[in-house]
Amino acid sequence: MILGIETSCDDTSVALVDMTGAILFHQIHSQESLHGTYGGVVPEVASRAHVEVLPSLVRSAFLDTGLSPSHLQGIAVTRGPGLLGSLLTGISFAKGIGSAFRLPLIGVDHVQAHLRACVDSMESLQGKTIGLVISGGHTHLFRIENWPTMELVSQTVDDAAGEAFDKGAKLLGLPYPGGPSIQKEAEKNTLPLLPLTKKRIRTENPLDFSFSGLKTAFSLLVRKTELNERTRPLLAASLQHAIVEHVLDRIEQTVIQESPSHLLVGGGVSANALLRKKLQVFSEQQGMTLHLSPLSLARDNALMIARHGRELFLSGMYTPYPYTSFSPYTR
Ligand code: KG4
Ligand code: ZN
């Protein structure tokens, strides 16, 4: 059995999986209401909340399943990237239980683990696979040929896709988190979309993403528009369209270059309904199998950490007790 712990940002989550990857326990405790009043995640508030919630979540995992830490083969914990204080709470807790039972610690990369949420079993993927992770802090494209390892194909050179949603929502006075707010507001729009002209950025890698030009164009547009019940949905829909088009453009180019058989898409932004619809149409046209993260697992969760951790463990990629070289990373 593998215990999974996720505390990289503002969700505290714990999962237990058996050695086939089957789920025995999974809970996510969201801090959304704590950060909502500030319009974004406050790192100090986040790490304190993890400290308060994590012990009781782990206790529930064992009480609900009737199992104990002595049944564990290892502990998978998010090692990074994330907020330093938040990562440290999960890692320290994992080291605590792990030390008591002399268990291997499995450091899991949070961004890569988002791809593990897209499929029940990685063994089902035959042929070349491309993975896209779009979240509040990351926009990364990976080539997966030898799971559980992968190669980075491209990433954002500035903001993440989720940041573009979150900052756009803030400018429109919509509640945090911005992605779902923008989507909801955009659904009310009936007017033709406004173009968001952005300066073309020159990236060394043509598959890299960039959202900062879009963000600037959007803030200029908001500044010269009177916000009301008609313009707010119009602006939200225009921003959503521009973000989705940029993501699709990079996916299209990647598919031309790589000719993958499978496309995995995970991370918080993969919950976006417009993006999901467009990806489905595009994948069908290409004859490529699309594996979208189920909505319940698009957000941060420990199931993806436990499952990815299980596969890293089976490949021998773990740190045995006493964990001298185990530390978090933020980027
Ligand atoms: O993966 P996640 O829960 O946390 C990070 O690792 O960042 O992603 C959170 C991000 C936020 O930026 C949030 O606004 C965005 O995912 N998001 C969405 C939607 N739901 C969440 N963005 C667009 N449309 C949505 N429906
Ligand atoms: Zn995430």
Image: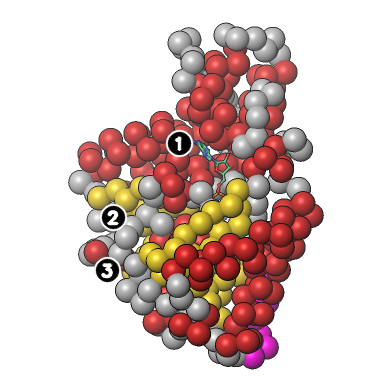
Q: Quadrant of the N terminus?
A: bottom left
Q: Find residue 102 and report its image quarter.
A: bottom right
Residue at image coords 23%, 40% = 284
Query: Is 56 or 12 nearer to us in this picture?
Result: 56
The answer to whether residue 147 of the structure is visible from this angle is no
- Disc 1 to disc 2, how far (Cα)? 20 Å
Residue at image coords 50%, 21% = 186
- Three-letter amino acid code of the residue under disc 2: His
Name the spot of residue 194 as percent of width and height, x first. 53, 17
Residue that numbered label 1 is attached to:
272
Name the spot of residue 169 as percent of width and height, x first. 64, 29
- Report helix, strand or loop for mark 1: loop
Residue that numbered label 2 is attached to:
262
Q: Quadrant of the C terminus?
A: bottom right
Closer to the chain start, of discs 1 and 2, is 2
- Report helix, strand or loop for mark 3: helix
Residue that numbered label 3 is attached to:
123
Name the spot of residue 274 as percent of width and height, x first. 41, 31
- Disc 3 to disc 2, how far (Cα)? 12 Å
Q: Magenta residues? A: 322-330
- Three-letter amino acid code of the residue under disc 3: Glu
- Dot in front, 3 or 2: 3
| Numbered label tally | 3
Closer to the chain start, of discs 1 and 3, is 3
- Dot in front, 1 or 2: 1
Query: Is 123 or 120 nearer to us in this picture?
Result: 120
- Disc 1 to disc 3, how far (Cα)? 27 Å
